[in-house]
Each structure stands twice: as structure tokens, then as C-alpha cells.
Image (cartoon, coloured by chain):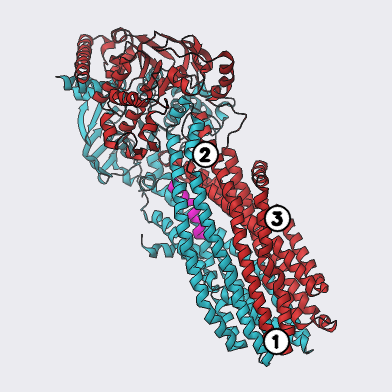
Amino acid sequence: MSLGAADRLLLASARRGGVWVGVTVVTSLLLTGAGLALPAVMGRTLDAVLSEGDSARWLAFTGVLIFVLVAVDAVDDLVGQIAEARSTAWLRHTLLGHVLALGTRATRRFTPGDLVSRLVGNAARTGNSASSLVWIVMGLVPPLGAIVALAFIDYWLCLTFLAGMPIVVLLVRAFLRDISDANEGYFRVQGTIAARLVDALGGIRTITAARTVDREAHRVLAPLPELRRHGLSAWDAIARISARGELVVPLLVVAVLAVAGLGLTQGRITPGDVLAASEYVVMAAGIGGVLSSLSQLAQARTTAGRIAEVIAEPPMAYGRERLAEGPGRLEFRHVTVQGTDGPVLQDLSLIVPGGALVAVVGRSGAGKSLLAALAGRLVDPDEGEVLLDGVPLRCLGREELRQAVAYGFERPVLLGETFADAIGFGPRTPSAEVLVAQARAARADAFIRHMPAGYASRVADTPISGGEAQRVGLARAFVQAGRVLVLDDVAASLDTVTEHHISQVLTSALAARTRIVVAHRASMAARADIVVWLADGAVRGRGPHRALWADPEYRATFQPFSLAAAEMVGGAR
Amino acid sequence: MRRSVQILRSSLSRRRREYRRLVAWSLVQAAPAFLSGWIVARAVDRGFLADRPGIGFLWLGALAGAFLVGAWGTRHAVLGLASLIEPFRDELVTLVTTGTLHRSARLGEPADTAGVARLTEHVERARDAYGAIVLFVQGFLVTAGGVLLGLAGLDPVLLALVVPPLLIGLALFAAALRAMAARQREVILADERIAESASALTGGLRDVVACGAEDRVRAETGAQVDAAARATVSLARLTAVRTAALGISGWVPLLLILIAAPWLVRSGVTTGAILGAVTYVSQGLQPALQGFVQGLGSSGLWLLVTVGRMAEIAVDPDEPEATAPEAAEAGTGAATGRTPVRPGGARVEARGLTFGYAQSAEPVIRDLDLVLRPGEHLAVVGPSGAGKSTLAALLAGVLEPQAGQVRLDDAPVLALGGGDDLARHRVLIPQEAYVFAGTLEENLTYLAPGAAPADVQAAVRAVGAAPLVERLGGYDAPVDPRDLSAGERQLVALARALLPAPRLALLDEATCHLDPVAEAVAEEAFTRRPGTLVVVAHRISSALRADRILVIDGTRVALGTHAELLAGSALYRDLVGHWGAANASAPTVGAMTRAGRVRDAVRVLLRLTAHR
């Protein structure tokens, strides 16, 4: 990811603040100007008062400046946050839209948790820092202006300050180094505790069985004293640093005051100048703050880079073509899909006749689910083409494609508020009758009815088993089924009676559709018109189950059970 | 919210001494705030303006000294703060760790690891916020006190100029604070809602795409993004009030001092005193106010929200735990005396077992009866999700059945006491073997603390883990679980389970990551001993070694020997890969002979491994 893209994104999000960004520029100018002028004006006021001159004019001036400072500061706060909120929202919308446009590609590149942190934390940080870009520039003005102002009052004051400055810089340096040393140990121990907790959570069933939860809590927390030791040594560093910090600026002030006092005695400067000088020293010492603004900007660039990285991924492009009437014939032409280490499917060609019930079998890792994903373009092949009734899937419009191909999954994620929503989730909005009929077909009706609120029960509040979730997902697939229905191992958590019932639905009510079923059990393969046997990224065999059954290796693909038996028979020979 | 206040308050009240020390040091820290204006006044009036710069320098030297003392105070105040905050962090980590573990134990499944990472972050954030609050509130109170005293020392009239605007500003801030807290909470909640629907979205991206629901999901999550932006803006409006309050408290006193200056001078207040008053306000009061208002405004709320989140993690005492028998039965165990542990195998008797994971869900196991002879070897087979692990957990007394009972040698399994005795009655090894950071010895004697080295060695050799022990560098070598493969971890868990010589051992796919030969060796170690054995089988070879096999599929079960089940259970035939036998067309005979061949093969293999 080039930083160019990150910077462009940062600026684009800053622009999204709209007029508010312009207003921020104005308010920050006003604030800086007023802040810089105030000490001098206050000094003049004091002098006027002491010399019994025209103090009213200067007092009014001071009053106006203070009013500007207070009022504009409040406005600046408000406006800055409005701009930030708008920038953040824009970033989030953009990223959200892009993640959805990427489709399953997004989760192949980034983990879901990672995407969430980019969408929530990173977007906020980028959005916030974008409008404070203004302040990073404006932050430089008061310290530099204050140094100049010191010189105007009396160049000795300026020289005193400049001589003291290197000490400040040195101390700020020491500050950064000290802290990072102490923190390293702290984070390491913290990581140890977290790792132990994760280990214990992974072994929670062992722990529950042995009833050793409390013992384990003890073990996880064992490094706590060490954590505290590192924590205290970090605090020790902080204590030294804040003591130094509390010393540096006041000592600079004292030095400048001493020089100013001498000037006062010699009549070179007035009491008002002393007042102004003591304020300006503090302001000038704030130059260290620019460093932290800069590091904030650096952080914003990093987070912007993380967002730009997602946006740089090309989205899934859909065509505009529509499907003519057709039986749902699928054709895979020389399809290759690359995995992390080598191709998962290689140069696979296959024709699925319209209206057929096709079982896809193979050992785990053979690419069954990938083949299923290709059939409805959840994944694009790296090479080759998949065609539905003669039209390449890439050329189809998104809605056209989703209406044509419906999916059921082994572990469906149920979306929507209620169970009725979850079953009707998709391009087709079914009537209540259709919904219930399909739930019944998927054997989901009975247990949903048992729930307190039936179909209106909230999915999030109702714990259901893996098998039950599978059946709700199946009902969703039945509702949406177009000319092609792809079922990716939907029977994995179902008992054989339910599975039998569902395969009967597949061969009766849904018989007109092309059905692609990823199967692990021989009984399902036996009911299919055609079995596609995948091995080593290619079609190893294709035909009716009965014909393939003669091959012991084919038999070995069903259940790890027979596999092991076959291995052992082979081994004993 | 109330719970987090409770946690914070009790943490503070337990450390009164540390708190008093912090207060004492922050008084030292406030010395310059108290002295600065007064010293400046003296330096100007008696030194520089009286043509005696030497005296002026002396006074300024005293000021520098005051700053040195103050810095010394700061250093110790920070250390005092640390002695408040570090124990607080320890408390939070303990709360979170025990809470997460107990909750996971109750649910019977691990919490998500991303959640663990978030918790770590929450703890750190709470620690920082807590520190900031104590520091700023403390700092403000002490500094304000010092400044007001100092002003009174210069001229009590000055108080009349400084105190009213200070109070007005603080009152305005206090008035805004409650509303701000509510709105800040809204912002945090809105962000969490975005995080929630974003993780539902990213976790279910495949389903969203497959359902063609991109637009719908985008609109729904987008609405939450907009809601968060609205919440931020509505908070910003109040933040502006806060900033104004800060301005009134900090700047108006300066203006008033200048306005009143002609009158002050006339009534005898010196130039130095006016300079001193300005110094007090602009260099003492203003920075302390800023820290106070910002610290309380944002850190305070973060603290409440994050601590509240952690309090949620902590176990709700009303909810019973899956391991509740541990607590409940400990009492009854003491009353009835411990169940004596006899050597040999346990008789296991389950009557009318019924279990479902939720009240509304269908039971996974319904009305199951099962009796195992002492020393019998049972294999449990069935499709995934059929309830095999649930059965193992019920037999071990890890789960409590909704109906029915499991008895181990006539004692209810749920009544078995905790402690080391438990493992001598029964051991359950789940599929995911638990190896923790510690020495290998600690890991192996987990269920039998203090086991003799010879016994440990024998157990290790029996399950075939001797080469692993050698590779790791002996029993005293530290083990990092991440360095072990899944199979190696299972070997450790198997040897561990063998050590207490349990009367009932339950292996729940505990050998699934071993190759068939290693699996045979490990299982053989368990069959050789006199104890009763239940194996949730991962491979048919493992089922074939058993005396009897239980086939479970949802709520239907079949029990019998391999031959009986081949003849009587269609599901068993299906699982074993003998499809077609049910049709009785061709391969029934072939299948039988094949099964025979498999059996022979297993026998040969077992003999081979036994001779190793």
C-alpha cells in the first residue's frame, strides 16, 4: 500500500467535513490570533492602569480578546467535532459499501474481526485526525509567535528562552525512551496472561470435566505480580518524567522572569511587559506539543492506510445480462482456483445438466465447497469460466444471478431480526404461507413453533443447535431457490431421519431445479442422478453412485470411518 | 453502571492508606502553586521595582526552590497514584479472567479469542482513565486550594474577583456533566452497535452475498453509522458548553483583576501583587482546570463504561454453573462422607437420560438407558451432531441431565466430590487436548498431583508418548503449547488421563489427531487396565476394538456388537460405509467378509504394536 493512497484518503475524508472544515480554519485563525495578542494587550492594560493613562481602551480590548477566546473556543470545539463526525461517517459508509461490493473476496483477504476494527476504530481515528490537520499547522503558530513576541519585548528575554530550549528538547527525548523501555516488559507479561487465558479457554472442556476452573484462574493469573512489577517500574519512569516536566517550564519562566526583573530595575521594560513575558514563555514552551500533533498525524496516516488497503481491492463486478428461459444447465470451463499454497481446483471442466440432482463428494480439502461456491459466483475462478444456461456468470446482473441460484450452507449465518425474517432473507419476499411451507419442508417448522413467539421469536435471543440452524438455513434456501439450488453439506448436523426427509423434498417438490449437493454420506450420493467425485483439485470420477462404488478409493471418501478401515486393510496386506 | 461505581468505590476504600499518602504528596506538589504569585509579588515589589535586583533574584531563587520541592512532590504523588492504580488493574484482570473462565465453563465452550483481546484493551483503558481521573481531580482540588490561599495572602479582595467566576464556570460544567455523561454513553453504545452489526456482516458475508442482500445490509448498517454520527454531534454541542465553562472559570478572573486594577492600586495593592495574582490564575488555576474538566468529562465516562462492561463479564451469582455440582455437592459430600475409591472398573448405569441444550430446543438425547459392566469397553458412534459428546459429558457428570440419572457404582455421578478423588472415579478427555504453559511433569500430573515418577513414566510409555518426552527434553522441560502439534497435545492428555487410574475413562474423540497406529497403541493402554472405558469413536477401527458399540443418531439409539449392528442397524451400515446392504441386493455378504477382514487386520496390528 503506497502512502499516496492513504494521504489521498485522509484529504478526501477531511474534505467531507464540508463547510465545517472551512469554519474550523477561521476559528483556529481567530483563536491563535487572539491567544497570541492577549498577553501583550494585558501587559499594556496593566501599564496603562499603573501609569493612570487611558486604561479603558486597553481594558475593552482585553475584554474583547477574552470574549473571543472563550466564545470561539466553544464554537471551534463544536465545529471541529461536527466535521470529524461527518468525515468518520463518510469513511465508514465508503468502507462498508466497498466490503459488501468485495463480497466473499473481502474475507479471503482480511479476517472478519480485522474488518470490524478497520470499520470502527480505524475509521474513527482517521476521521478525527483529518480535521485536526488544521490544528497541526496552527499549533505551530503560538509557540513561534511567542518567541518572536519575547524578542519584541526585549531580545534578552528571547535569548534566555532560546538558551533554555535545548534542555526542554533533551528532556522530551529522554521521556520517550524511558517509557518505551518500561512498557515493553509490561506488554510482554500482559501478552503472557492473555495467551494463558486463551489456552485455558481452548481447553475449557478438560477444565470443566476436571472441575479445576479455580485452579486454572490461578494459573492464568500467576504472572500478575510480575505485571505489577513492570507496571510500577513504568510508573517510576512516569514519575521521574512528570517531575522533570513540572520543573522545566517553570524554571524557564523563572529564568525569563529574572532577566525581565533586571530589565524592570533598569527601566528597559515595564511591569506590563513582565506580565506579558511570563505568559509568552509558557506559550513558547508549548512547542513540544507540535511533536505530539505530528505523531498523531503519523498515526492517522497509518490508519488511513489500513482503510485504503481494503478500498484498493477490486470489487466484484457484475454484468447486465439477463437469463433466457432455461433448465439451469451449469458448465464449468477449464476452471482453476488458487489457494494459499497451490491450486485448490485445477483446469476443471464439468457439465451439470439442467434439472439434475448432482452430489459432489470427495475427501475433506478436495475442493467440494469451492466448486459449490463457483456455481453461484460466490467466488470467481482465477482462470476459466462458469456458465449458466449458456451465459457466463460474470456477465449476469447481480439480482438476476441471485434470483437464479440459491444457497444452503453447513453453518448458515442467520441474518434478520426474527425467524420469519431469517427464512425470508433474500431477493424474493415470500408470503406467510410459502414461508411456513418451506420451513416445514426443511423440517424447521416444528421447533420454531415451539418457541415462545413462534416465527416472530428473535434469532439473537433464541439459542438453537447447529442442526436447527442448518434447517432454518435450508428453509431460506428453499424459499429463494431459483433454477439452481446449491446445498453445501447442509445435512452435516442432521440425524438420518431428517436427512432422509430432506432428500425426499429434493427429489420431489424441488425436482425441476438443478440441485448441487455437497455430500459426506453414501446414502445421499446414492439418491443423486450423478455423482461428481473430486480428488486433488480435479474431477476424479463422474457417474451414478452404483457405478463408482466398485472403486475402493471412492468408497473411502465417505466418512473418516471407512477411510481408516481401508487404510488398515491396505496396511495389513 | 451502578455495578461499576461499586467496583470503583470498593477498590478505593480498600486502599485508604495509599490514598492518604497520595493526598499528602499532592499537597507538597501544590507548594509552588501556593507560593508562586506571592513570591513574584515580593520579587517585584521589594526587589526589581525597589532598585534592589539582588533581592529580586533571591526571591526568584526561592521560587525555583519551590518548584523543585513541587517536582519532588509530583514524583511521589505519581508513585502514590501507581500504588492505587496497579492493585486496581490487578483486580480488573482477576475479575475478567475468572469471569471469562467461569462463563466459558458454564456454556461449555470457549469464549471467542477476539473477545479476550478486547478485554485486555478494556482493562488498559480503564487503568488509564482511572489514573487520569484521580490525578486531575486531586490535582485540581489541591491547586485550587493553594491558589485561593495564596490570593488571600496577597490581598483578600482578590478572592472576590476570582472565586465568583470560578464557581459560576464550575456550576455550568456540573450542570452539563450529567447530560454529557448520558450523551457520551450514547456515543459509546452507538459505536458498539456498529461493531456488532459490522461483525455480523463480515462474519456472514458469504450468506449476505448468497442471499443477494447487500443493499439491505448496507442500508441497515449505514443507518447505524449515521446514528453514531448524530450521537457524536449531539455530544459536541454539550462539549461546547463545557469549553465555555472552562473559559468562564479560567479567563474571566483575569479580566476582572485587570478591570479592578485601578481601584486596587488606589486602595494600596502593589504592582507586584497584581502581577502575582495574574500568575496565580494563568499559571496555577487555568492548567489545573483544564485537566479537571477534560479528565472528568471524557476519562470518567470511559472508566464507568469499560468497568461496567467488565462487570458484565464477571459471573452473575444468580446463574447456576454447569460445574455447580462442585459447589453444591461439596457440602453434601462432606455430610455423607467421601465416595470411597475402589480399584478396578466402575459399573455405569444410566436411566432415562434426557438432555437438550435449551429449554426450547429439541432434546439431543431422549430417555436413554445404558448399563456398562465393570471393565467393559464401549464405543459410541454416530453422525456429527448426533449427541455423542453430550452423552460422554452426561456419563461423566459434567452436564446435568434434564431428566434421568447416571450412577457410578450406585453413587450418583453428580454427587462425586471435587478434588483429586474425582479423577480416580472418572476422567473425561475431550477432543481438544489442553496443554498449558508449564513443565511437562506439571501437565502430566494435572489429574494426579504428586504421582510417582515411575508411574508417570509408565503412563507415558503406555500411550506411546515416550519419543515426545524425549523431543521436548524430559519431564522438567517447560512446554509451550504452541510448539506441540494437535496429535502431540492429545498424547499428553492421554497419558495424563491414565495416571489417576480412573475407574471410568471417557475418551471423546481424544485420539482424532493421531494416526491409526498411534491411536491403536493409545487406546490399547486404556483397554489393558481394569477400568471401564467409553470411547467416542472417530474411526471404525476404534469401534471394532470395543466389546459393544452404541450407535446414536438424534434421539434414536442402537446397542450391540459389531456383527449385531451390521445386521440390525441401517445407520450403522451407512456409517461404516456399507451402503447397499440395506437393499439386500448384492453386497451384504461381501460387506460381512470385508468387515471380517478389517477385524483380522486390526488384530494383526494390535499384536504387532504390542510386541514393540
Whether residue A429 is visible to the viewer of this picture, yes or no, is no
Secondary structure beneath dot 1 equals helix
Query: Is B94 located above or below residue B508 in the figure?
Result: below
Provide residue A148's location: percent of width, then percent of height: 57, 84
User: What's the distance in space between the residues labelled 3 and 2, CA to CA?
Assistant: 33 Å
Looking at marks 1 and 2 on the same chain, the residue that comes earlier in the sequence is marked by 1
For the record, the magenta segment spans: A113-127
Query: Relative to B358, is B379 on the left or the right?
Result: left
Whether residue A291 is visible to the viewer of this picture, yes or no, is yes
* Chain (red): B
**Residue drawn at 32 percent across, 43 percent down:** A393
Q: What residue did someone put label 3 on?
A: B177
Q: Nearer the viewer, residue A170 or A497?
A: A170
Provide residue B612's location: percent of width, then percent of height: 20, 22
| Residues at discs 1 and 2 in contact (Cβ within 8 Å) | no
What colour do you see for chain A?
A: cyan
